[in-house]
Image: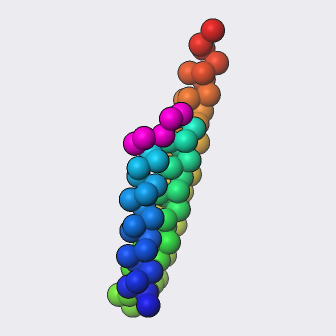
Amino acid sequence: MLLATAFVLAAAMVFSLYRVLAGPTVFDRLTGLGLISTKTIVFLLVLGFLTDRVEVFVDITLSYTLISFVGTLALAKYFEAKKADQP
């Protein structure tokens, strides 16, 4: 059952990647990146359950979550400043 969940998450990540690559606006692309990040977090936890090493993958997931959050904030701030500079 967990293996099927991992495959479904991987397929959902591919669809989100399409949104990132073909998104009509920057905000669609940022939303796609957020979706990929969230699915990666869940995928890492499922992988931890599959390998019976949940405690290791929880630490990795927490680190990835913090890095992803800071990266998303930095990108949003950059695009907001870039949009404000345009006439």
Q: Residue 83 falls in which quadrant of the image?
A: top right
Instruction: Indicate how the structure is coloured in the image.
Output: rainbow
Q: Where is 64 relative to 81, above or below? A: below
Is residue 22 in the magenta section? yes
**In this rendering, does residue 59 appear at all?**
no
* Quarter of the image that includes the N terminus: bottom left
- Residue at 59% x, 13% y: name it: 86
- Residue at 38% x, 59% y: name it: 14
Residue at the outermost top position: 87
- Residue at 51% x, 49% y: name it: 32
Q: How many marks?
A: 0
The residue range painted magenta reads: 21-25
Is residue 59 in the magenta section? no
**In this rendering, does residue 42 appear at all?**
yes
Q: Is residue 60 left or right of 73 when viewed as pictured?
A: left
Where residue 58 sits: x, y (%)? Answer: 49, 75
Where residue 81 sits: x, y (%)? Answer: 60, 23
* Quarter of the image that includes the C terminus: top right
Where residue 5 sits: x, y (%)? Answer: 45, 80
- Residue at 40% x, 83% y: name it: 4
- Name the foreground residue: 86 vs 24: 24
> What predominant SS class does the magenta segment belong to?
loop
Q: Residue 60 falls in which quadrant of the image?
A: bottom left
Q: Where is 75 relative to 44, above or below? A: above
Where residue 35 sits: x, y (%)? Answer: 52, 56
- Name the foreground residue: 86 vs 52: 86
Q: Where is 34 relative to 80, above or below? A: below
